[in-house]
Image (cartoon, helix red, strand yellow):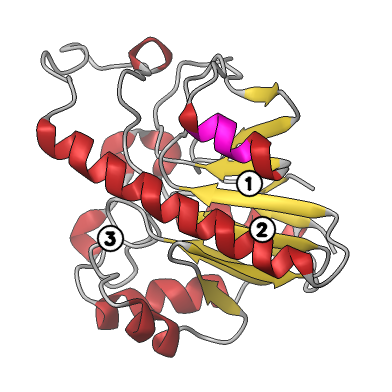
Amino acid sequence: MRYFALADPHLSLATADKGQEKFGPHWRDHDRQIAESWRALVADDDVVLVAGDISWALRLPDALPDLQFLAALPGTKVLIKGNHDYWWHSISRVRAALPPRMIALEHDAVRIGDAVICGTRLWDVPGVRFDDLIAWGPGGPPADRESSDDDLRIYRREVGRLERALADAQVKSADAATNLQIVMTHYPPCDAELHENELTRMFEQVGVQHVVFGHLHSLKSGLQPFGAARGVQYHLTACDYLDFRPRRIA
């Protein structure tokens, strides 16, 4: 069993007005690119982690074609919510609607094979910026991007949810030999240089080996941010960053 990741598929099979070409010509027919690469790389007994921004749909029924598109591809899929997954409201309703071999996490954990995988959406980490990584258009980055009081409130709430996810992972790791602990977040949990913060310390304290996330798009060509620090490997797996190819992480 191998573990792959591919975040931010931004599917819109039932929302035709949400085509991705406005983000660049490389997004044209990106669902076809995903499917072809996925089938070439992933076997049916593998696992693929999809770290949020799955569908542009606003309602769960409209997201079902996108979920079924992913379900038809090889492997077991593990999903978390992204900031654009407006169709994802009640986790119980999402889980009831999922096709077979799809698992939705919401600040909890699941054991699959030798790995325990946990996840939550997270939020922008205060003081962490990625402006230098992004190929902005002529206008450059927005002028005011400082964290608001609402941002800080949401971030603190998400930290609590991450703590619950990690705690559930420890419970599910305790009853059997576990070779891998993997965390999924939608937002990056640290800066690209991997400086220590409260989130990285949480991962290190419980023995996480891999952290998978997305959210960052339109990176400058040739950049390879993130990587390994203090025993943890950090994987940026946004679709366009990976050329729409799932990345094997373990």
Local packing at callout 2 (Cα closer than 10 Å; few below 14, some 14-19, many 20+) is many
Q: Is residue 228 above or below residue 222?
A: below
Residue at numbered disc 2: 38
* Residue that numbered label 3 is attached to: 56
What amino acid type is highlighted by mark number 3?
A: Trp
Q: Separation of disc 2 and disc 1 at Cα?
A: 6 Å
Q: How many marks?
A: 3
Position in image of residue 183 (x %, y %):
59, 50
> Which residue is painted at 33% across and 14% down in the image?
131
Tell me which numbered mark, 1 or 3, is placed earlier along the sequence: 3
Q: Is residue 86 left or right of residue 132?
A: left
Q: Nearer the viewer, residue 245 or 22?
A: 245
Question: Magenta stretch containing residue 94, yes or no?
Answer: no
As rendered, which of 48 and 181 lies closer to the eye?
181
Name the quarter where the N terminus is drawn.
bottom right
Horizontal and vertical percent position of residue 223 = 56, 15
Q: Which residues are magenta?
A: 199-203
Magenta stretch secondary structure, dominant:
helix
- Mark 1, other Cα within 10 Å: few <14 / some 14–19 / many ≥20: many
Q: Are marks 2 and 1 in contact (CB under 8 Å)?
A: yes
Dot placed on the residue nearer the N-terminal end, 2 or 1: 2
CA–CA distance between discs 2 and 3? 20 Å
Q: Looking at the image, which residue is at 31% across and 33% down?
A: 124
Looking at the image, residue 149 sits to the left or right of residue 103; the answer is left
Left or right: 239 as drawn, with respect to 230 = left
Which numbered disc covers residue 245?
1
Does residue 241 appear anywhere in the picture? no
Under mark 2, the amino acid is Trp
| Point 80% across, 72% down: residue | 175
Percent position of residue 184, x then y: 54, 51
Give the residue drawn at x 68%, y 45%: 206
| Mark 2 vs 3, N-terminal side | 2
